[in-house]
Image (spheres, grey):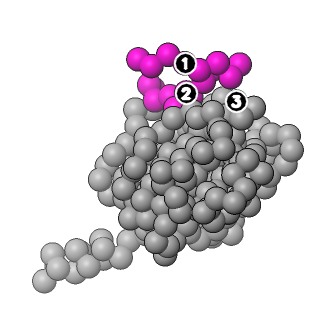
Amino acid sequence: MFMVLDLNLKSEMSNYLLHIETATKVCSVAISDNGVVLSLKEASEDAYIHSESLTLFIEAVLVEAGITLNDLSAISVSAGPGSYTGLRIGLSTAKGLCFALNIPLISIDTLDALYHLIENNALNIIPLLDARRMEVYAKVYASNGEILEELDAVILNETSFSSFEPFIVLGDGASKCKELWQGRNIVWKETLLSSAAGQAKLAYQKFNEKAFENLAYFVPIYLKDANGVRRNAS
């Protein structure tokens, strides 16, 4: 009898996760409980605001969710690709908190999190992140989440990804495609940008699977270095 009661209590326990998204010009932070977003704070400016705003946003979402840092079970962070500086700021903050609180770190692919901002559709989805000039970081997903084309840095042209039409495009790399891809069978969601909210379900799944990163050795997926030069594949 006591064992059954303990199991029931365990199934109803809260698992508060903090989510940090700094891969683009969006600075976004969220709190979730068992995969459900409780609070979200984010802003996007022409200049990167992560170094000034990230810790303030963390404090704000904790207050809104009615919890403290000590209530957190884990922290997830955008793993890239994206801004070299933005990713480093997000990861260093997440690592510092994980060390101090003795809780695990979870990494979430930036494009996977973007994909999870779209729900209940029957089309392929292509999240795009701006990679300077006419280049984007891209990954192609079927509506069921199957990966149709792996992550890569792609130089755009008039027929890019035509074999996957019709598809939904989103992320901060989408706006540079709109004129180039006029007349194509595309659903435009260019105002739907990277958000920590997209990490919640993925992070909770990884939390349950204990798919944690090594705090000492984990590094983001850069694809390019700080000067925008593509890194050689290992």
Q: Amino acid at mark 3?
A: Thr
Q: Amino acid at mark 1?
A: Arg
Q: Secondary structure at mark 3?
A: helix
Amino acid type shown at disc 2: Leu
Residue sitting nearer the eye, 45 or 18: 45
Horizontal side, residue 29 vs residue 44: left or right: left
Q: Position of residue 126 (x, y in %)?
A: 55, 53
Determine whether label 3 and label 1 are within 8 Å by CB. no
Q: Looking at the picture, how far across and down is residue 17, in whole percent?
A: 50, 58
- Residue 84 sits inside the magenta stretch: no
SS at mark 2 in the image: loop
Rounded to the nearest angstrom, the CA distance separating label 2 from label 3 is: 13 Å
Q: Which mark is residue 223?
A: 2
In this rendering, which labeled residue sits more in front, label 3 or label 1?
1
In which quadrant will I find the N terminus? bottom left
The residue indicated by pointer 1 is: 231
Distance from label 1 to label 2 (Cα)?
6 Å
**Magenta portion: prevailing SS class:** loop
Q: Nearer the viewer, mark 2 or mark 3?
A: 2
Q: Position of residue 197 (x, y in %)?
A: 59, 62
At 41% across and 17% down in the image, what residue appears?
234
Q: Which residues are magenta?
A: 216-234
Residue denoted by label 3: 85
Q: Position of residue 118 (x, y in %)?
A: 55, 66
> In the image, what residue occupies the spot 26% across and 79% down?
8
Residue density around tag 2, few if under 14, some if 14–19, many if 20 or more, within 10 Å: many
Q: CA distance from mark 3 to mark 1?
A: 16 Å
